[in-house]
Amino acid sequence: MILNNFATERAILFLKIQSLLFITLLAVTSLVSAQEWQQQRVDASSNPDAWIKKTSELIEQYDNQRQFEELAMAYALQVEAYRYSGHESKAHAAIDEGLRFAELANSKIAKALLRINQTWYFLQRGQLRQANTSITYAIENAKASGNKDLQIEADILHAQVMQNTGDIAHALQTLEKLNRNAYTAHPRLQVEFHALIGSIYLDVGANDIGLEHIQDALDISREHLGQWDVSVLEYNLATGYQAAGNDEKARQHFETALEISKEIKDDLGVAYALFQMASIDIENESYQQGLERLNQAMPQFKSAGAHPMEAQSRLAMVSAYLGTNELEKALAQLEAASSVINTLADNQLYQTLNERWSEYYQSKENYKAALERYKTSVNYMQKVQEQTQDKQVQEIMVRLEIKEQETTNELLKKENQLQQLELQEQQTSYYLLVWIIISGLLVVIIVSAFLYQQWRARKNFAELALKDDLTNAPNRRAIVRICKKGLEQAREQQRQLALAVVDFDYFKAINDQFGHDVGDRVLQRFAEVAKLSLRDQDNFGRLGGEEWLLVFFDVSKEDAKNIFERITKEMNSKPISGLPEDYRITFSMGFTNAHPEDSFDSLYKRADDVLFEAKDKGRERLVITD
């Protein structure tokens, strides 16, 4: 009996150990899955067809086993695979199914991922109200999930929605806030951040900065992401060069995007590239080639439900048919474009549509109708201005900047000729001509006012792109650019450039003990002191957090010591609001001179290494290295 009890206890213990191991295994498996789903998304973008097949098998397996959370995640991955392969209708159906199971399992990550993809689906179709609702749900679930990267992704996409709805100022503020407070090392999010902020700067006319951001995104994408992402960034970079007026580079990148899209069988990506290449063809009066490309792209836009792109393609066809004087075909495309655009709340498309109608009526020598349509296009431009506040519709403005005066004058001239022929029969024609001239002048005044506001907006946004929001000092992008240019100048002029990296001592303790507002005032004081303490030829900027970069020309090691001591003294020369009067602010500095072969990265690393040495030796000190 005792033996039997002992055997029973051993059996129970064995079962408990097995259960514990099984539970542990489940926990480990769950952890691995949580760590792997971001990489699986990258894999899905590289090989979408394989992932469509793989997720279909997983969906069937999880459905049979009633594992709703795993089922929702499988649908989330399948949606992305469908999107990467251009199967938009299948992606939409998978989103609906995935959300159903995500709700059953209350899976915050799955719901956030599915809502993010749903937002992209609505954006592509110009359904901006639905996109805004969807991204709101995505943000809520991303925050509830506790996954920082997912929250950043949702915030970036929210900024994308703001850009599409014309709220450029808030979109830019969101991105600047993320850049300041929510750094992530995840390549996909870095790509999305740089791509979007680059697109916004292109919108406001800051082309150099916009192209730089998109090139950064492309470089990261080539190193870490799949071919689909690379094709999208090649396309975005091409549109940037096109906006900057460099058609040659634009065409090169469009052709690269086209080749990659064909290689991965992304039919919708092929259509986008063909459309943009057709636009360049039509601008260069290669109308037949442009029409051939548009006729290849149009079926893909229609089947994917990409209504804004269908409308733009039809408007491009109108330009081509007007160029070949095929007015009946131009009219047919104008009517079809009108039908599509009437379903979209897009004033920019309405503006282009009315401009094309004006060109069509000019070809028909109906100058009165042409002028009316032209005025309507300007009215829609005004609506865009009122709706977007700081945003100017750059692609329209730049085109009108040169063309609007010529167009108005030509219309008035032709209308005047027509009225002269009728003057003998109808005396009231004189009054009509006066009315047309006054209307034309009003158009010129309105457009000129818009162009002036556009110039101011470009200037403001260009300055914002290079300033730290908290301290008004140059930001990371600005000071790194200054240092890189300084290295080139030093080599060319045989001058000595030096770099110093500054980091406050125990800065976290200030934030924790006295509050982040006090920490912000410490950073603002440093910016003030650095500006007063450095020479005109020296530069400084905030790298991020409490870290700063100082760039010097022709400065000795003794000068570096004096600068360190002077800034330390000035930092503590008067109290900072929120800190005790006797509280002493200190920092550590690593200083090094540049070598002829140095890049920015090698120079910064050397300065950062000696900064670390200064911290290691007790802080509040300067360490210098050659």
Image: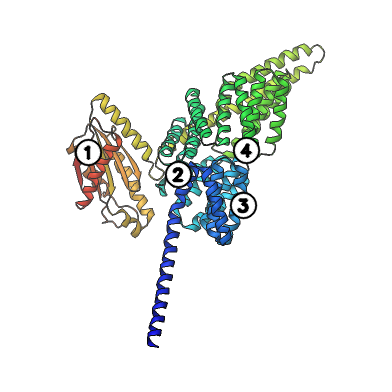
For the residues marked 4 and 2, what is the alpha-carbon distance in whole angstroms?
24 Å
Number of other residues with Cα within 10 Å of mark 2, as a class: few under 14, some 14 to 19, many 20 or more: many
Which mark lies nearer to you, 3 or 2? 3
Q: Mark 1 — residue?
A: 592
Quarter of the picture containing the N terminus is bottom left
Q: Tag 2, which secondary structure? A: helix
Kind of residue at disc 3: Asp
Q: Amino acid at mark 1?
A: Thr
Q: Is residue 569 above or below residue 258?
A: below
Tell which tag, 1 or 4, sits nearer the viewer.
4
Say if residue 111 shows up in the picture.
no
Which residue does the numbered mark 4 point to in the structure image? 306
Q: Return the disc, 3 or 2, that comes first in the chain's sequence.
A: 3
Residue type, label 4: Ala
Give the numbered dot on residue 96.
3
Which residue is located at x 81 percent, y 15 percent? Answer: 426
Q: On the image, numbered disc 2 is attached to which residue?
A: 188
- Residue 574: tell me if it is visible: yes
Question: Where is residue 490 drawn, in percent x and y?
Answer: 26, 28
| Relative side of 33 to 433, left or right | left
| Point 43% across, 67% down: residue | 22
**Of residues 181 and 89, the one drawn nearer to the viewer in this rendering:** 89
